[in-house]
Image: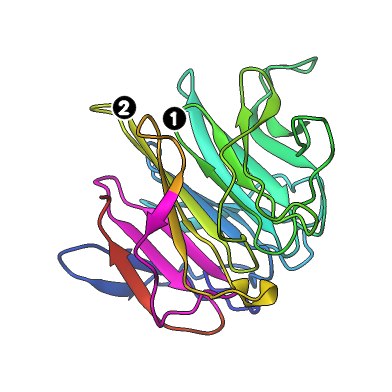
């Protein structure tokens, strides 16, 4: 989906057809806005969506049925900086959300394992974004989430700690410091995606750094993190003349290709290998 109050919803079919197709008739039943976000549950063939644009709406798209269903609203309105990520534990799906707007709040949608009532699929609040010293971090424009097999990573794009990266442990319900960026400053247009290869346990994060011109830098940097291989953010091929702006996004497919578009009304859509 594309923001700007658009109801368009498209599907890309890689890599053989290399084309976008239009869903008919299941376009978005809402107009997506700033902070709108998608995350897929490939196990159950579903896509979850935050509408954004200052609303609290949360939706589920059933791929085989080509239909949308509105679910329980997230507890806070979603604006620029909203993001989603998901993970599976004990054969259950959990969707994580930040809502932008300089909020530190983090929400999880799924089975409630905490105090009563238990076993109910709902939204509930988990540990807020914070540094190792307990100082709150705010999710600003460009904030993003990504999941690997056992952690949720967040780049908050906090205006006071722009290069921070933190990681959430679902088991401990707490945030921990993660590798910081060096030489770049995550900025509006920042986007991140996680990849986990079950066969060998390989984990990757890939990040569009965003529009660093607001900090006197370029707007085409990409960074990648290979867990177990130095475990730090390293340079990756830049996006060249594809300038990263608000609305940029990146994701992986199951076999290791990453795909990105770049915001600011651009129609560019690019693919890159996992290595």
Q: Residue furthest front?
A: 183
Which mark, residue 149? 1
List x then y, in percent, for residue 2: 54, 73
Front residue of this view, candidates 147 and 70: 147
Residue 114 visible in this rendered orientation of the protein: yes
**Depicted 128 relative to depicted 216: above or below:** above
Colour scheme employed for the rendering of this structure: rainbow
Q: Residue at x 66, y 45 (%)?
A: 97
Q: Residue furthest left?
A: 16
Residue 66 visible in this rendered orientation of the protein: no
In screen coordinates, is 237 left or right of 27? left
List x then y, in percent, for residue 267: 42, 83
**Depicted 51 relative to depicted 225: above or below:** below
In screen coordinates, is 86 left or right of 166? left
Q: Residue at x 57, y 50 (%)?
A: 181
As helix, strand or loop, the secondary structure at mark 2 comes to loop
Q: Which span of residues is magenta-colored?
A: 234-263
Q: Residue at x 45, y 35 (%)?
A: 148
As helix, strand or loop, the secondary structure at mark 1 comes to loop
Question: Which numbered disc flags the more N-terminal residue, 2 or 1?
Answer: 1
Which mark, residue 201? 2
Q: Quadrant of residue 213?
A: bottom right
- Alpha-carbon distance for marks 2 and 1? 9 Å
List x then y, in percent, for residue 104: 81, 45
**Depicted 110 relative to depicted 179: above or below:** above
């Amino acid at each position: 989906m594309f923001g700007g109050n658009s109801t368009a919803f498209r599907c890309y079919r890689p890599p053989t057809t290399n084309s976008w197709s239009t869903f008919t008739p299941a376009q978005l039943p809402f107009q997506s806005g700033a902070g709108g976000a998608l995350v897929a549950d490939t196990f159950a063939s579903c896509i979850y969506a935050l509408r954004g644009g200052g609303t609290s709406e949360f939706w589920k798209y059933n791929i085989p049925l080509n239909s949308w269903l509105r679910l329980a609203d997230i507890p806070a309105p979603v604006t620029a900086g909203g993001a989603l990520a998901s993970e599976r534990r004990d054969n259950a799906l959990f969707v994580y959300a930040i809502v932008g707007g300089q909020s530190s709040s983090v929400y999880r949608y799924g089975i409630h394992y905490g105090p009563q009532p238990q076993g109910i699929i709902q939204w509930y609040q988990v540990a807020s974004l914070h540094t190792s010293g307990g100082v709150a971090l705010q999710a600003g424009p460009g904030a993003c989430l990504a999941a690997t097999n056992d952690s949720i990573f967040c780049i908050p794009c906090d205006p006071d700690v722009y290069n921070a990266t933190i990681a959430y442990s679902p088991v401990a319900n707490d945030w921990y410091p993660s590798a910081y960026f060096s030489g770049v400053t995550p900025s509006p247009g920042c986007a991140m995606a996680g990849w986990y290869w079950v066969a060998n346990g390989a984990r990757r994060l890939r990040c569009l750094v965003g529009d660093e011109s607001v900090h006197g830098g370029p707007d085409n940097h990409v960074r990648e993190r290979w867990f177990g291989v130095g475990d730090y953010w390293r340079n990756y091929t830049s996006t060249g003349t594809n300038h990263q702006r608000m609305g940029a996004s990146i994701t992986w497919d199951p076999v290791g290709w990453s795909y990105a578009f770049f915001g600011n009304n651009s129609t560019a859509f690019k693919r890159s290998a996992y290595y």
